[in-house]
């Protein structure tokens, strides 16, 4: 049986946010600890960070900033969800972030059904989250959509079907999305085990190999580069 990564090579025209925005208006964004500009920001202030992003997009004549897979980030130090003194720090991002305004439409990457959803409402967490289940050539896998609006999960039911490119949700603002500047966290998951409405999007160094294998780079599907 072909690997999931091989199956992705055969796919094209995959979108997860507003289809009217061409990929030519996407611009890469480095949120890693090596980005010295970020040291001058208060990353715990979602409003300040959103202003920074707006200026970044304007400077680069773009509408969407994207990136983050495999990045080591300082952004999570503010939250005990990732930085509990009793466990190893989780600071390596294993999804792809797409930064754009709250209210932007979020699309199903592929045909799929709702596996689970919930509001992960801790500081620094996903906020409203939807996980879709997909099947390609007999291979089952999942896509996770985090930092959504509350309205996105109000009338949702497990098993609801969404076609490729159909609007699944809208992006939430900092009051509901875990206190971040608005963005979509998009992640691919091979084996979801018993997780429901949630799955780690940030891991520790010691668990990195497992998560890189179980959560392939979403850009293999989106083909942004």
Image (cartoon, rainbow, N blue to C red):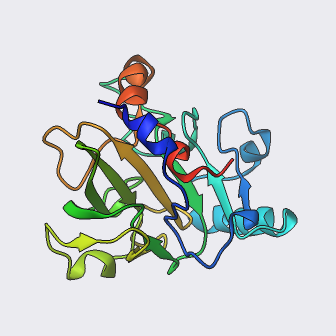
Which residue is nearer to you in this view: 119 or 166? 166
Relative to 198, residue 89 above or below: above
Which residue is nearer to you in this view: 122 or 71? 71
Residue 179: x and y, percent? Answer: 46, 63
Residue 54 shown left or right of residue 217 in the figure:
right
Q: Which residue sits at x=49%, y=61%?
A: 184
Q: Which residue sits at x=71%, y=69%?
A: 51
Residue 1: x and y, percent? Answer: 29, 30
Residue 162 shown left or right of residue 6 in the figure:
left
Give the quarter of the image for residue 66.
bottom right
Residue 134 at least partly seen: yes
Residue 22: x and y, percent? Answer: 68, 70
Q: Which residue sits at x=13%, y=67%?
A: 158
Which residue is nearer to you in this view: 196 or 163? 163
Give the quarter of the image for residue 47.
bottom right
Residue 172 at least partly seen: no
Residue 92 shown left or right of residue 144 in the figure:
right
């Amino acid at each position: 049986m072909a690997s999931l990564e091989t199956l992705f090579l055969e796919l094209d025209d995959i979108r997860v946010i507003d289809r009217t925005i061409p990929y030519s208006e996407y611009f890469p964004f480095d949120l890693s600890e090596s980005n010295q500009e970020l040291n001058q920001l208060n990353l715990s202030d979602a409003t300040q960070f959103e202003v920074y992003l707006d200026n970044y997009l304007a400077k680069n004549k773009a509408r969407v900033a994207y990136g983050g897979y495999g990045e080591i980030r300082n952004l999570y130090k503010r939250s005990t969800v990732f930085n509990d003194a009793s466990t190893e720090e989780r600071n390596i991002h294993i999804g792809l972030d797409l930064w754009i305004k709250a209210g932007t439409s979020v699309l199903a990457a592929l045909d799929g059904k709702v596996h689970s959803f919930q509001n992960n409402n801790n500081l620094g967490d996903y906020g409203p989250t939807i996980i879709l289940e997909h099947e390609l050539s007999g291979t089952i896998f999942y896509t996770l959509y985090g930092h959504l609006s509350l309205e996105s999960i109000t009338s949702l039911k497990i098993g609801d079907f969404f076609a490729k490119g159909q609007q699944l949700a809208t992006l939430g603002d900092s009051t509901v999305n875990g206190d971040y500047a608005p963005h979509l966290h998009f992640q691919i998951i091979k084996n979801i085990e018993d997780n429901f409405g949630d799955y780690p999007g940030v891991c520790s160094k010691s668990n990195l190999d497992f998560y890189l294998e179980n959560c392939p780079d979403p850009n293999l599907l989106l083909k942004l580069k």
